[in-house]
Amino acid sequence: METIWNDLRYGWRMLRRNPGFAIVAVLTLAIGIGANAAIFSVINSILIRPLPFHDSSRIIMVWDTDPNRHIPNGTVSPAEFLDWRDMDKSFKELDGFRTSYLTVTGNGDPEQAWGVQVSTDFFQMLGLKPILGRDFLSDEGTPGHEQVVLITYSLWQRRYGGDPAILGKPILIDSKPYTLVGILPKDFSMFGTSTSLDLWLPFAFNRAQLNREDHELLIFGRLNDGVTLRQAQAEMETIQAQLKKQYPDVDQENGIRVTNFHDDLAAGIRPALLVIMAAVGFVLLIACANVANLMLARAASREREIALRSTLGAGHRRILRQLLTESVLLALIGGALGVFVAYGGLKLLPYALPPAGSNGEIPHSSGIAIDWRVLLYTLVISLLTGIIFGLAPALQISRSHLSESLKEGTRGSTSGRRSHLVRSGLVVSEVALSLMLLIGAGLLLRSFVLMLTEDLGFNPSDVLTMQVWVPESHYPEKAKVINFFQQATDRIAALPGVEAAGASNYLPLTKWTSYCDFDIVGRVPPSEGKPFTSQYRVIDWRYFQAMRTRLKEGRDFLPSDGPDTQPVAVVNEALRHLYWRNQDPVGKQIRIHQQVPLPPWEAEKHDGWLTIVGVVANTQGWDWTEAQSPLLYLPFVQNPSRTMRFVIRSHADLSGLTAAVRQVVDVLDPEQPVTEVHTMDELLVSALSQRRLSMFLLVIFASVATVLAAIGIYGVMAYAVTQRLHEIGIRMALGANPADVLHMVVADGMRLAGIGLGIGLIAAVVLMRYLQSQLYGVKSTDPLVYCGVAAGLSLVALAACYFPARRATKVDPLTALRYE
């Protein structure tokens, strides 16, 4: 320990004697290590840190998969869920979960909140206890005993002023009294986002009334001790196969998927984070190469010192340890400064993250911070970095020829061929790594530009949207639902400044959608278990006009398409291509399979034959990487839905327009809240937010890598010019003109850059295929990006070579020869 301490003190003195070298090296390392620490903080929060539930690694989700609809995460029917719970042996607990909009009245203005129905032992499965009151009781999961509710801490504070006396008292939810039995912890968030699930109610299933085709539940569970995810998957597949034999009328093609809850939450962002982590790893390697080159250049001035140490008895290992101790000390200082760089980067990160509350919000992103894991990671990579960039210079110096080094005036052995090859190899690696980063950034940038310029199938500008959900308790009959929304839309369309107004149960650029199966007159499905199917939208007759969705064939819906007229439908181009590829679908008839019982978010679709009257353009969904979804449009008055989103096109002030719409709804129903107020432009930003974040970070890191690589090339060429002053002086004395010298030096540098470009291009072709899942409209081998990036980096390398070469042309031959 004393020897190590002495080495550290000596290394510190050496850094103090060379402040210029120390500052440049520390800043370079701080950038590389700080970038890694910042991105690791993000990965730690989202992918590594356990969820805030007891033994969260054992919490799973069970999904129904539907290959016919390309759905990997499908919901489950209550009947199916109850059978699973009776038959499985892999889970300690298996619990159902269903969300819906609920309206809270009394004690203030009406408020629409997200409500969740869960199994009574759901919170026990999470290992979560209320901070006030109690959890659900087991008998509250039976019909007639389910009128109890737990609420979140935020709703308790917001609506009831944090009054503990509210416990045990009834609150009105959808005009029904529910006894408030508990308050959930302040920091509780089921999915790690800012969207609050405020009302929690117990399920009360009547098994005799359940429909196996009523898919409406998410399924959570906790694995038994010693049971692996693979074993649980195998058991659930066996159970599903048994149920298919027992109930041959259910979909025989559906599969099942058991997944870790934490992994499922982060599935959407994990590939992008891993790509960015690889990118900052490349940045750190480039920083290491730069510092290694600095240390090699500095080695010439230390050869006499090392030679004297060897002469006085220091062995090869002792010298190597001293030099590595110095490089590790340098890396630790850079790492310490890198923590502050990471802290500053994390302060700026929220401005680049998807907005809180948006559909693109990243789970648990609000908890991104520097904790002990990040500090430990920073320490480890600092130590590794010190060894990586210090090993080659240390080996080079420790192997110096003593007799040559002790000769006064020698240029030293490290200036020989071996040192030159090492420095050249470092430059080649910097160029190759920078090229790969720039190609990745270029591919993402081009993909993002294509997304922005893609025809969405509608015009999002100047469109305001807001949601209204009418509860069955207030509107038990569908005629009342139709009348409410028709009156509301008519009055909104008549507001000053409104160009057009319509309504739809689901909007594009959101994650919300529903599916329906249907028959086509005169045709049978292509195979058993694969019915004709499509996503569907219920829309007001003015919706296409408000969204400016183009009509391709036939006609739009008309005001005359009423509840008692011929039922009609409109299809998009993707649905036409799927089922009427070589035919005109206009005039064809279909019949939708009605779902019974009807989930609260589903439209009450017409039970009869519908005539297709038109074809409209495809509209962009949530995920740009997926093919355009087949979509069936149904008129609202023939297929009423209790949840509708108003779509209002206007150049008027949106805040004033929002207030006017709220007033319209308030006049029609004072107890009906208006929620989810967004512009379509905001929804577009939300849909692109995660891709924009990936592109932004990769462009930033690629730019930093390019600057570091340019500095590295400049440093190597400048050092080479210094070492070749004697040679350059002789050449110029023998008649070489400045242009010849310029060409010679630039050619040497560009030769290295060319080798790096070649290696980088080959490596990029191999590595960029892992980026393909995040690209839209661009192949991972896109020649335009490859050629453009290679040309741009060549110009950067040329500039880095030109300035040292230009200095070489100004060498005075007599001065150079006299110096030597």
Image (cartoon, helix red, strand yellow):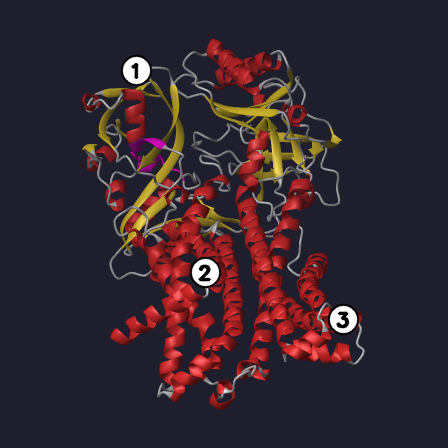
Task: Give the SS element for disc 2.
Answer: helix
Q: Would you place residue 34 above or below residue 514 in this image?
A: below
- Residue ID at (63%, 66%): 765
- Whole-percent x, y for residue 405 in the image: 50, 85
First along the sequence among labels 3 and 2: 2
- 817 vs 741, nearest the viewer: 817
**Dot 1: element:** loop
Query: How many residues crowd around disc 1 within 10 Å: few (fewer than 14), some, or many (20 or more)?
Result: few
Q: Which is more foreground, mark 1 or mark 2? A: 2
Q: Which residue has dot 2 on it? A: 26
Which residue is the site of mark 3? Answer: 743
| Marking on residue 107 | 1
- Callout 3: few (<14), some (14-19), or many (20+) C-alpha neighbours within 10 Å? some
Q: Quadrant of the N terminus?
A: bottom left
Residue 166 pos. (x, y %): 21, 21
Q: Which residues are magenta?
A: 197-211
Task: Work out whether mark 3 precedes mark 1 in sequence or the reverse, and give the earlier one.
Answer: 1
For the residue pair 337 and 197, the one nearer the viewer reads as: 337
Gap between marks 1 and 2 measured at Cα:
61 Å
Quadrant that contains the C terminus: bottom right
Q: Is residue 176 above or below residue 805?
A: above
Left or right: 91 in relation to 452? left
